[in-house]
Image (cartoon, helix red, strand yellow):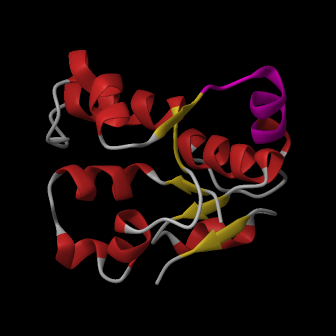
Amino acid sequence: MNLLLDSHVLIWWWANDRKQLGKAIDRLLSPSGGLFVSAASAWEIATKQRLGKIDPGVAMDVFEEALLADGFIPLAIDMAHALRAGSYAMPHADPFDRLLAAQAELEGLTLLTRDRALQAFPCSTLWD
């Protein structure tokens, strides 16, 4: 199963926060498919880091290198992803979540997220 990591999953991974990750840590340590990280997560994490809301555990100037070193696969945002994210009828206002849901749906990925609000989108979600 190919997984798309929600931004909080990546932050917890880099912080080695096993309590927050719970059983999802097993999927990250022994994946049965690819582990993808969206450019939307890079955007979200960089924005929240700039605003002082989070410490992502990785400097933004080595973000992509850190992803690759951990075996994660970067996922670019394309026009189809943006159009799908903008066309969802759900009232969910978070643009990052909408984009992750669209990417998961269109790319056939399962979104690894603890955010239950994402279950309303027409993509596969998972949390152990």
* Residue 13 placement (x, y as % from top left): 26, 56
Residue 89 as seen in the image, left or right of residue 33: right
* Residue 66 placement (x, y as % from top left): 27, 32
| Residue 123, picture quadrant | bottom right
Residue at screen point 57% across, 52% down: 34
Q: Is residue 85 above or below residue 50?
A: below
Name the main secondary structure of what is drawn in magenta.
helix
* Residue 81 placement (x, y as % from top left): 76, 33
Q: How many marks?
A: 0
Residue at screen point 41% across, 30% down: 42
Q: Nearer the viewer, residue 69 or 19?
A: 69
Residue 58 as seen in the image, left or right of residue 38: left
- Residue 79 colored in magenta in the image: yes
Residue at screen point 70% across, 55% down: 109
Q: Is residue 79 above or below residue 34?
A: above
Residue at screen point 21% across, 32% down: 49
* Residue 54 placement (x, y as % from top left): 18, 43
Q: Nearer the viewer, residue 14 or 20?
A: 14
Q: Quadrant of the N terminus?
A: bottom right
Q: Nearer the viewer, residue 29 or 41?
A: 29
- Specify start and end residues of the magenta stretch as a single range: 76-85
Residue 33 as seen in the image, left or right of residue 124: left
Residue 27 as seen in the image, left or right of residue 38: left
